[in-house]
């Protein structure tokens, strides 16, 4: 069994498993907080309606057997508890059997949400988390050597995430090739962060350096992951540094966090010795159990078979990003921001309590946690938490007719008109304190970051220009 183990990666295993545990924890907290308003029985797109038309074989989920809101939120709390035990290292210390069991349950639970989550769970990092959670299960507990096939599979996942993102950029938008994409992206990204305005205002030559460095990180470093040390470790460190740059420049849910965690699969323990006090180095492993060797070997072969589709996608001139080829969300194709938007639009939803609402009524805006609204408000840091409604509102704002292109948008307006309690939980500020407004309207604005002079004059971080009415006045009936 000695050939099965990867010498010198015990601490890396701890960081991989605990890191994935942290991301699972955030994902299940989001389930507990957001499930009812988005996918509950009275949600914007009820999971129950989806379950009625999609069979189990197409979307495996425990909710095919029971789909009540209480059950869904209760399982979310189960996920929170199990993920917390992983972060604390409890199942890992108990041994390989406990580790495999806990990660398997976490994967099955979260798969159940993703498969019925529709547009709210259609982000690439949902599948990346499922793949990462499934693969770190194969690292075993502290009583066994770190399997080298499992480390290799994790590096392959990191390769697909990074290399796929690099290729889709070069193939999709000319600004990635002429190094000008970051003239726009810091300003137009879905949810800017506290430092995004400063990144946007960097001199143009530095934006060119940013893009060039991104190409190196996503197209060059991933190849080194499969070479001997120290080259693999250098690749891992380079990817981590690049991802930290993205963390500081914007909010991308847990995409950067899970990528950083995956990169530790390339870092040997001798490189991680300085953090050994934070995550104690596990004791020497015992002999690996035969059943675990069979499990790792079988799944490794299965993953090799499944790799055909992502390889074909990577080599295709018509590459697609964030595609899963099976309902288990394993061995998918990934990528992000193949195309960059040049202008930022926002939908501002306003309400009034005027008994005779009209254009001259006193209108007040509903504020969301992270999407730009009030021009004077500093964009918050919310990642690695995932605000699904805020993200979908960014997509909706690209269209002047969001109610026609996004079936959840009309129900959102109706619930705001009704003062729906669950929807109010997703707001940063309800100007009516839960009292239903008499009418709503939606207006579309073009936003851009203020210049230095504008900021000093107005105190605002954004300046906005009215583009047009989206809905007209919608009275409560």
Image (cartoon, rainbow, N blue to C red):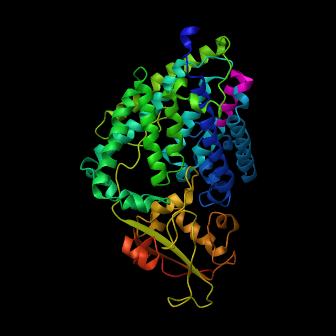
Q: From the viewer's perspective, is residue 369 above or below residue 122?
A: below
> Which quarter shows the C terminus?
bottom right
Query: Of residues 280 and 240, which is closer to you in this image?
Result: 280
* Residue 5, quarter of picture: top right
Magenta region, main secondary structure: helix
Q: Farthest residue in the front direction?
A: 274
Q: From the viewer's perspective, is residue 145 above or below residue 52?
A: above
Query: Of residues 180 and 322, which is closer to you in this image?
Result: 180
Q: Which residues are magenta?
A: 93-106
Query: Of residues 63 and 432, which is closer to you in this image?
Result: 432
- Report the label total: 0
Q: Is residue 212 left or right of residue 310?
A: left
Is residue 46 among what the camera can see?
Answer: yes
* Residue 18, quarter of picture: top right
Measuring 34% from the left and 48% from the top, which residue is drawn there?
Answer: 210
Residue 94 colored in magenta in the image: yes
Q: Is residue 289 left or right of residue 358?
A: right
Where is residue 466 drawn, in percent x and y? 40, 78
Where is residue 456 drawn, in percent x and y? 42, 75
* Residue 344, quarter of picture: bottom left
Measuring 64% from the left and 65% from the top, which residue is drawn there?
Answer: 423
Where is residue 382 drawn, in percent x and y? 56, 56
Where is residue 228 drawn, in percent x and y? 41, 20
> Which quarter shows the N terminus?
top right
Residue 33 colored in magenta in the image: no
Q: From the viewer's perspective, is residue 282 above or below residue 387?
A: above
Q: From the viewer's perspective, is residue 297 above or below residue 212?
A: above
Is residue 328 among what the camera can see?
Answer: no
Q: Farthest residue in the left direction?
A: 178
Q: Is residue 307 left or right of residue 428?
A: left
């Amino acid at each position: 069994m000695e050939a099965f183990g990867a010498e010198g990666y015990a601490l890396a295993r701890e960081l991989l498993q605990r890191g994935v545990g942290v991301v699972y924890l955030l994902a299940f907290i989001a389930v507990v907080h957001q499930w009812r308003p988005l996918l509950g029985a009275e949600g914007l797109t009820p999971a129950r309606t989806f379950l009625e038309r999609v069979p189990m074989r197409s979307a495996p989920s425990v909710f095919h057997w029971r789909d009540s809101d209480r059950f869904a939120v209760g399982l979310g709390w189960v996920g929170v508890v199990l993920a917390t035990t992983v972060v604390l290292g409890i199942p890992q210390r108990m041994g390989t059997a406990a580790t495999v069991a806990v990660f398997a349950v976490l994967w099955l639970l979260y798969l159940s949400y993703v498969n019925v989550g529709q547009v709210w769970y259609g982000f690439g990092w949902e599948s990346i988390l499922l793949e990462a959670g499934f693969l770190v299960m194969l690292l075993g507990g502290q009583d066994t050597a770190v399997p080298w096939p499992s480390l290799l599979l994790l590096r392959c996942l990191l390769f697909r995430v990074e290399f796929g993102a690099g290729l889709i950029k070069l193939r999709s938008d000319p600004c990635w090739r002429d190094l000008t994409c970051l003239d726009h992206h810091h300003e137009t990204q879905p949810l800017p962060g506290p430092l995004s305005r400063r990144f946007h205002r960097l001199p143009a030559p530095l934006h060119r350096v940013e893009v060039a460095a991104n190409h190196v990180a996503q197209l060059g470093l991933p190849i080194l992951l499969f070479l001997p040390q120290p080259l693999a470790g250098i690749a891992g460190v380079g990817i981590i540094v690049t991802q930290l740059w993205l963390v500081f420049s914007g909010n991308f849910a847990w995409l950067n966090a899970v990528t950083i965690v995956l990169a530790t699969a390339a870092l040997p323990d001798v490189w991680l010795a300085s953090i050994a006090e934070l995550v104690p180095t596990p004791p020497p492993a015992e002999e690996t159990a035969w059943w675990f060797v069979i499990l790792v070997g079988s799944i490794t072969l299965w993953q090799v078979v499944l790799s055909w589709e992502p390889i074909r996608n990577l080599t295709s001139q018509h590459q697609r990003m964030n595609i899963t080829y099976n309902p288990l969300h394993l061995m998918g194709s990934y990528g992000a921001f193949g195309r960059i938007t040049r202008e930022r639009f926002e939908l501002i939803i306003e309400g009034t309590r005027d008994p005779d609402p009209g254009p001259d009524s006193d209108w007040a805006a509903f504020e969301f946690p992270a999407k730009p609204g009030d021009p004077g408000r500093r964009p918050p840091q919310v990642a690695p938490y995932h605000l699904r409604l805020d993200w979908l509102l960014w997509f909706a704002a690209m269209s002047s007719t969001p109610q026609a292109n996004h079936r959840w948008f009309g129900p959102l307006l109706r619930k705001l008109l009704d003062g729906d309690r669950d929807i109010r939980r997703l707001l940063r500020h309800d100007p009516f304190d839960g009292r239903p407004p008499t009418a709503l309207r939606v207006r579309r604005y073009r936003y851009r970051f203020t210049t230095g002079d504008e900021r000093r004059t107005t105190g605002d971080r954004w300046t906005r220009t009215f583009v047009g009415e989206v809905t007209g006045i919608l009275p409560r009936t």
